[in-house]
Amino acid sequence: MARARRIGILTAGGDSPGLNAAIRGIGKAAIGQYGMEVVGFRDGFRGLAEDRSVWLGRRLSGILTKGGTILGTSRDKPHRMLVGGEVVDMTGAVIRTYEKHRLDALVCLGGGGTAKNALRLVRAGLKVITLPKTIDNDVVMTDASFGFATALDIATDAIDRLHSTAHSHHRIIVVETMGHRAGWLTLAAGLAGGADVILIPEIPYDAASIAAAIGRRVRAGSNFSIVAVAESARNTEDAGVYRQAEARKRAASTPEQVMAAIGALATVEAAHAGNTIRLASQLEALTGLESRVTILGYVQRGGTPSAADRLLATRLGSAGADLVNAGVFGVMVAARGEGTEPVPLEQVAGKHRPVPLDHPWVLAARHVGTCLGD
Ligand code: F6P
């Protein structure tokens, strides 16, 4: 009798609500529908390189509603992993683990960076598919990624709560939301929560324009304001410096140029730390209204996934098992309308999806009179 086919699963990058629902979706479909075996690898690509695994069978029950990932995660890359204080190419070790466990496929749950690492493994001869997860909503070629809906609910609830205290104290409350390079979460939560000002990295801001908008609200009788700011939002001057540093990195060709460009970008990013606090002080000085800051941080990624994320993760996971069964590899399982679609990893790897300036959410925000900082 032929042995059962075997799937490996790992979760990589920052954790996102819905990861466990997706692990369960793939695992239950693979075992229940196709008689496969399922093994999980701990802590992303690091666990695969170090051969740290766990059988997923009975462990798939009772995890649908759990936050985080039962497998653990890391931002390690197979080809550049810190081992004993040195950066080592662990691709060979990853392949050895894959072969030792006699895997027929590897399913990686992650964002654009994970897709890039997965594509490297495909090129090294492994059979890999990915599922899109991120609270940032910035994975290309998919209608949705799990994690975003939950983070949006949490951030919106926070903005709702901040309204009553801002109103009572006649204050400006600047609330910082996550979003490494994209403003989807801030824009959506700001719209849903009725923020008066929404600042996203795609639209560089001018503090004087924000202060003017807050001033107009005061003259109209509202002496409080909620400013929703993405962690990566920048004023026009800083945005120019950041764009230049990014362009330099893209243009770098020799290893020396790449290292120098990475260093320069890291310096620019380090200088950005504390930006939200500086903005709040600036607005206080410009408007004369007392200002406070709330940084939502990791609260947005923690805890129970929303119903929408459980649904998305389950259908992407079960579609992933179907693709493995059909022998379709080198793809991301994208959400398309009510269904799913395999998208070649080449079209996803290392890419990210910023908010288009003419996106309906941007237009709706402008139409209801929200200041976008420009
Ligand atoms: O990509 C998801 C995300 O939560 C970003 O919004 C945030 O900038 C980043 O991860 C934080 O990463 P870490 O967990 O490494 O601090």
Image (tube, rainbow, N blue to C red):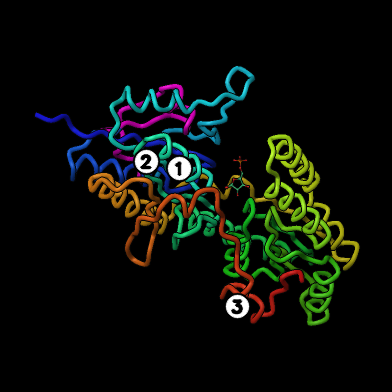
| Residue wearing tag 1 | 119
Residue 8 to residue 132: above or below: above
The residue beneath circle 2 is 128
Which mark's residue is nearer the viewer, 3 or 2?
Answer: 2
Quadrant where the N terminus sits is top left
Q: Amino acid at mark 3?
A: Ala
Give 343 or 137, whichever is nearer the viewer: 343
Say whether mark 3 is within 8 Å of ligand 1.
no
Q: Which residues are magenta?
A: 39-64
Magenta-colored stretch includes residue 123: no
Q: CA distance from mark 3 to mark 2?
A: 40 Å
- Residue 307 drawn at (x, y percent): 39, 57
Give the mark, 2 or 1, whose residue is nearer the N terminus: 1
Tell me the amino acid under the disc marked 2.
Answer: Val
Q: Which mark is residue 364?
A: 3
**Which residue is depicted at the point 59% across and 63% down?**
189
Q: Using a 10 Å C-alpha cutoff, classify the residue at mark 1 as few (fewer than 14 neighbours), some (14 to 19) or many (20 or more).
A: many
Residue at 47% x, 33% y is 44
* Left or right: 147 in relation to 285: left
The amino acid type of the residue labelled 1 equals Leu
Taking 51 as reference, is 205 left or right? right
367 displayed left or right of 77: right
Q: Are marks 3 and 2 in contact (CB under 8 Å)?
A: no
Please determine whether, in this image, residue 70 is positioned above or below residue 236: above
- Verify CB contact (< 8 Å) between mark 2 and mark 1: yes
Q: Residues within 10 Å of mark 2 (few under 14, many from 20)?
A: many
Q: Secondary structure at mark 1?
A: helix
**Ligand 1 lies in quarter:** top right
Q: Is residue 229 above or below residue 20?
A: below
Q: Residue at x 84, y 74 (%)?
A: 212
